[in-house]
Image: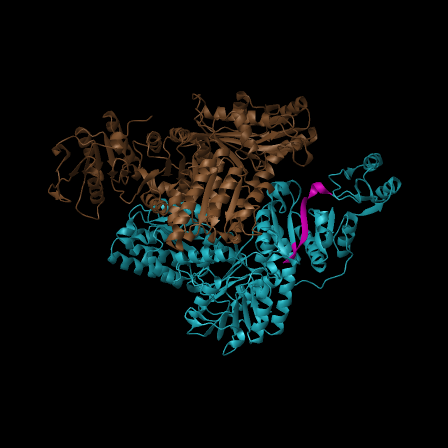
Chain colours: A brown, B cyan
Amino acid sequence: MSRDLRPLFNPRSVAILGASNDPAKWGNRLALGALRGEKHRSVYLVNRNGGEILERPAYPSLSDLPEAPELVVLSVPAEGFEEAVEASLAAGAKALVGITTGLGETGADGRAREAAIVERVRAAGAVLVGPNCLGIFDAGSGLDLGWSELNGGSIALVSQSGNLALELALLAEEYGLGFSRFASLGNQADLEAGELVSGLIAHEPTRVIALYCEDFRDGRAFARAAQEAVEAGKPVILLTVGSGEVSAQAARSHTGALVSSASAVEAACRAAGMQRVRSPRELVDLAQAELARVKPRGRKVVIIGDGGGHGIVASDVASAQGLELPALSDELQGRIAPHLPDAAPTRNPVDFAGAGEQFLTIFEDVTRIILESGEVDAALVTGYFGGYSEFSDEFQAQETDVALGMARAAADTGRALVVQSMYPRSPSLVALREAGVPVYRQIEAAAWALRRLVDQVERPPRGVPELPAAAAGEPGPRGYWEARELLGAAGIAFPPAHRVGDADEARAAAAELGYPVVVKALGLLHKSDAGGVALGIEDEQVLDAALAKMATLSTEGYSVERMAPVTEGAELIAGCICDPRFGPVVLVGLGGIYAELLDDTAVALAPVDAAQAEELLRSLRGAAILAGARGRPPLEVRAAAESIATLSRLAASRPDLAEIEINPLLVTPSGALALDARALSVENGADAR
Amino acid sequence: MSRDLRPLFNPRSVAILGASNDPAKWGNRLALGALRGEKHRSVYLVNRNGGEILERPAYPSLSDLPEAPELVVLSVPAEGFEEAVEASLAAGAKALVGITTGLGETGADGRAREAAIVERVRAAGAVLVGPNCLGIFDAGSGLDLGWSELNGGSIALVSQSGNLALELALLAEEYGLGFSRFASLGNQADLEAGELVSGLIAHEPTRVIALYCEDFRDGRAFARAAQEAVEAGKPVILLTVGSGEVSAQAARSHTGALVSSASAVEAACRAAGMQRVRSPRELVDLAQAELARVKPRGRKVVIIGDGGGHGIVASDVASAQGLELPALSDELQGRIAPHLPDAAPTRNPVDFAGAGEQFLTIFEDVTRIILESGEVDAALVTGYFGGYSEFSDEFQAQETDVALGMARAAADTGRALVVQSMYPRSPSLVALREAGVPVYRQIEAAAWALRRLVDQVERPPRGVPELPAAAAGEPGPRGYWEARELLGAAGIAFPPAHRVGDADEARAAAAELGYPVVVKALGLLHKSDAGGVALGIEDEQVLDAALAKMATLSTEGYSVERMAPVTEGAELIAGCICDPRFGPVVLVGLGGIYAELLDDTAVALAPVDAAQAEELLRSLRGAAILAGARGRPPLEVRAAAESIATLSRLAASRPDLAEIEINPLLVTPSGALALDARALSVENGADAR
C-alpha cells in the first residue's frame, strides 16, 4: 500500500499557493514556515496578485516558477481547488497538501468532487494530504508548513484536529519531548491515516507514533499498518472518539466521520497492538514511557521514596493500577538496610526516612542493589528526588550524578526505572530523562504508564486477520429460522427442531422430538418480549395451551424444539457486527442475568479461530462461571469457542450481514448449543435494530 | 471536644527551644520562620549555649525570658523532651509544638512516655501538637514555624507527612491556591486530627479543609468533627492510606499507625461527608473545585469547545465520569446558532469551529445563553480558551473581559462553570480563577472534579451514628450455634432448628421439623470446606448417609434445620467488623456466585437503621437481583434491611466482638432468613481469622 512519501515530507522544492502578507491568514503562516526551510530547499510563494510577500517576489501562478515544485501547498478557496490541483500536477508536483476547506466535509457533493480530484492526483503519480487539513511538519528535513510550535523529537503525530495537536505539543514540551514529523489528516481524500503510519515505519527519527483520529477510512489497512509499526519496534498510541453516543455524534458533525464503535476500535487495537488512550495527557504520558531506554518485563515493582507518605500513596496508586509490590526478600532487605537510617522500612515500599538529604548517593546505591537482585521488574522512585538540586549548585551537580547513576543501574540490569518527582523540571531530572528514564509529575501518571508498558508485554498483538473471500447471500432481514439455517449450515449445533404450521403438526413434532419441548412463534422481531416463546413444555396439554396463547402472534408458523439442558450450563452471547471501517467484529459475553450485572464483553476483529475465541471467553470478568465456580463441573468452553469461531468465519465471509448473533449460546459440561439466533442485512440493519 | 487553639495558631509570644544558627538544623528554619512574624508577636530564641542566633540574643533557658511564652516550639533531643515540656509549662506556655522525634513512634515505651507528658500538658490547661511533627503555619496571624513554602490562601492543611505537604503546596501554587493554616500532625499524642479539624470550623479564612492522615486516633470523634465542618460549609478532603496491605504495612512502619481498613475509612467518609482522594493531585484538583463560587446542582453538563477535537475528547471523558451530556433543545440550539459559524455543531458538545478567534465574545454570549436556559447544571469549556491572550495585549484584555463575563454568567444563573485550557496560566484564566471559576490543565481533572461536586449533592452525609451503651458479653470465639443464639436473641430470624447430639436425636428432630432438612456439624471453624454441611436432605435414608459421612467431623453435635427456600431468593452477606479507630462498621454484599464475580459491597458506620441498611443494599451494583431481575418477583429487601440493622445494633453494643457475620442471609419474596453465622471476639480475632 505504501507509496513514496519523500516528496511530501522532504521535497526538493515547495510552493505555497495562496501565500499571504496578512498575519490573520493561514497562507501567511504557511509561507513563514516554508521560508524557515529555505536552506533545505527552494521555496516559492504564489499569489495571483503577484507583488511581494514577506519580502520575496510572489509568483502570479505556478507556471511562472523557474522549476517544478515537488510539493505544492494549496491554501485557496474551495471553488478554485480543482484548478489549483490541475495546475500543480501540470507544473510537475509529486505531493500536494490541501488546506482548502469546504469540500468532502460538507456532504456528498463535496465528496464526489474530492473523489474526482484524487483520481487525477493518483493518475499523475502524486499524493495528496487533506483537503481541510492544517499542514505538515518534518523536523529532520526542516519542513515547517504551519506547525512551528512543534519542537523536534522522536514522536510522529498524525492528527485530525489542529487544536489537539497543539495541546499535545504543549504537554510534550513539559516533558522535554518533541516531534519527528506531523501530519494534519483533514478529509483523508487520498492519503489516509494508515498510509501515513506505513510511511513512518522506515522513518528513522520516529520512535513513537501518535494519532488523533476520528475516521479510520480503510480500517483494516490502518490496523495492519499499525501492526507492522508495532512489530518494527515503533509503538502506536491512539486517541480517538470514545464509546459515547454523544462523542460519536459530535465526530460526525466535526469531520463528517464514519465513526466506528468502541468495540471495533478496541478489537483493532488488540489486533494491531495499538495503545488506546482517552486524553491528550494520557497520550503524552504514554509516549514518554514508550521512549524509555529499558521497559519492564513484568509487573513486580519496588517503590522507593525518601519520605513515608509518598511511599504509601505510591503503593496505593500502583496497587490500584494492578502492579504487584512484592515484599523484598529478607536477604535483599539485609543488603539495603545498612545504607538507610535505623528502622527505615526496607520491605517495599522502601522509605529512606529523609536520609536522602545527608546521603544522596543512597538513591543510586539502593536502586542498583534492588534492580540487580532481579526480585522486581521495575523501580518506581517517588517524592522529593529532583528537589535536592534546589539547595545549591553543589547539590545539583551531585543529584545529577546520582540520577545518571540510577539510569545506568537500569541499563546495566535491564530492569526498568520510572521516577515521580515534585520537581520534574529540575536539571537533575532533565538529565535523567535524557538518559532514557521517564520522569512524571504525578504519581498516577507514573504508575499508569508503567502498567501500560507491562500490559503490552503480557498481551502481545493478536494480529489483524485476513478476511476470507466474500460469499454470496440473500439480502433482507432474517428471522430466527433463517438465521438458524444459515448458522446450522455453517456447522453450529442447535437443538433438534421442526418448523410447523399448525397445532397438529406441532403435536406430531413434539412427539417425535420427545418432551420437554420448546415452542417459538416465527416471524416476530422480538419474540420473547411478545410472548412468542414457551419453554419447558412437559406434555401435550401444556403444548396446546401454549399454542393457543400464541395463536394471535404467529405469522410464519412455529419452531418446535427439544428443550436444552439449560440448568446444567451457562448462557453466553456471541455475535458479529460489521463496522463501517473495521469490518466484522466478534463480541462474546456472558448472557442472562450476568449480562445485566457485569456488562462484560470481549471483542476481536473477525474471523477468529477457536483458540482465540477461547481466549476471549477466558478473558471475561465472569470467566469463573465457565471454569465451574462454586463446586459445579467445568463447562465445555472449547465447544463454545468452536461455535464462536464458526460464527466469526461466517460473518467475515458475508459482508452483506450487518449483524449476526447467537443469544443465548448454551455451554454445558458436555458441549455448546445455540438456543436462539438472528441476523440483519446491511441494507436493513438500521430498520430492524 | 474543642479546646481553645488560639494560643497555638495566634500566640502573643513564641519561644523556639533549640533555635540554631546551623542551616542544616530544623531549629534554624523554625527560628527564621518565627522571626518573620516579629511584627505580630514577641519571638524568643532559646539555646542552652546562649550567645547570638540570627543576630538576636539567644536565651539560655525559658526561665530567662522577659515574659511568659504563650507558644513554645520544642526542637530538642528526645532525652530532654520531658524536661523541656515541664520548663515550658512552668514558664506559662499554653501551647506546645513538639518537633522532637524518638518518642511514641518508636514503640510502647515511647508511647508511655508521651502519655505521661500529655497528662501534664492537659493538667496545665495547655495543648500539644506532635511530637515528631514538622511545625505549623497560620497565614492570617503571620505564624510561620517551618513552613515558609506555603502561600497564603483558603485551604487549611493537616498532614502526617512533611513531603506530601510540600508536594501539595507546589501543586496548589500551580492553581494560584494557598493555605490559611497548616499543622503537621506528628504522633497526635495530645491534639489529634479531629480536634484540629474542629478548630477550623470557626476559622474564618479557612474555606476548605484538607488532610493527609495515616492514623485517625479517635476515629468517631474525627468523623464527627469532619461532619460538623462539612455542615458548616467547609468541605473536608481526605488523602489517606488505601486498601492495599502493602500501604497499610508501610504506614505502620512510617508512624506506628493503627491503620484502618479501607471499608472503615469509606464508611467514615460517607457518614461525615468527607471527600476521599487517592493522590496529591486529586486533593488539589478537588480543593480548587470546592472553592468554586457556583457549584453544580446536578449532573447535566454542556461541553463548549472552540474546536471539534477538544469537544469530542471532553465528551468522552465526561461521559466516562458519569456526567450527563443532554442534547440541547432545538429551541436553545436555535438561539445559539446565530452566534456561531454555519454548520457549527450546537447539539452538545457545542463546537465554535474556530470562530472564537474572530469573535471572542461568543464564549461569553453562548455560555450565558445556555446557562440561562436551565437545560444544564454546568458548562465545561474546553480547549483553546486562554490562548487568545498569547496573540497580543489587545486580545489579552478582551479575553479577560470575556472570562469575567463568563464568571458573571455563572454567578447570575447559579449554574456552574468549569474550564479546561491548554493555557491554564494565561492572565485571562488567572482572572477567571480569581472570580471563582475552577480552571484545569487536564480535561480528566476538570470532568473528575465536576463529577465529585455532583456526587456531594446527590449523596449527602449519612451522619456519624452514636454508639449505644456497651453491653456485656461472654468472651471467646463463637461457633455457628452460639452466634445463631446471639443473633436470634437480638431478633434475627433463622430457620427452625434443633441442636442434637447423635443420629437418633437428628432423626427425631428432622421428623419434627419436616423434610427437607439441612444438617450442620457443630464445632468446626470452616464447616462447609470440611464437608460439615449437608443441604436438601429429602428423607431419613439420606439423613443417615449424611450423618455417617460427618461422623468423624463433629465435635459438638449437629444442628438439624428446616431447609430454607433458597431457590426462591438471593443470598446476601451481612457483617460487622470492629475497626481499631472507627469502631463497628457494617458491610453488606451479594453472596454466592455474585460475591465472587462482582466484588460488590457497601459499608457504613454502625449502627444503621433499616432505611439506611436498605439504602446500602440498593446501592449495590448487583441490586437488580433484589428488584426481581429477569422476570422474577421482587425480593423482600426491607426484611433483609431489618436484619442488617439488628445485626449492626448488636455489633455496636458489643465492643468485645471483633467480627460478626451472617453469610448467607437469604432474602426471598416474602422475608429474610439467616442461614449461617459466626462471631469472633476481639482477643481471639487474630487467631480465628
Q: Is residue A240 visible?
A: no
Q: Tell which of A287 and A260 is nearer to you.
A: A287
The quadrant of the picture occupied by the N terminus of chain A is top left
- Looking at the image, the residue that sits furthest to the right is B504
Foreground residue among B377 and A328? A328
Name of the residue lying farthest toward the bottom: B66
Q: Position of residue B511 (x, y in %)?
A: 85, 42
Tag count? 0
Q: Which residue is drawn at the image coordinates 24% and 25% (left, top)?
A: A123
Q: Which residues are magenta?
A: B565-585
| Location of residue B573 with respect to B463 vertically, above or below | above
Q: Is residue B109 left or right of residue B284?
A: right
Name above or below for residue A488 compared with residue A546. Answer: above
B576 in the magenta segment = yes
Against B393, is B49 above or below?
Answer: below
**Residue B410 drawn in magenta:** no
Q: Position of residue B106 (x, y in %)?
A: 61, 57
- Closer to the camera in the image, B681 or B448: B681
Q: Is residue A509 left or right of residue B456?
A: right
Magenta stretch prevailing secondary structure: strand
Q: Nearer the viewer, residue A396 or B185?
A: A396
Q: Is residue A114 above or below residue B464?
A: above
Res. A114 visible in picture: yes
Q: Position of residue B54 (x, y in %)?
A: 42, 68
Q: Is residue B600 left or right of residue B553?
A: left
Whole-percent x, y for residue A575 in the image: 51, 31
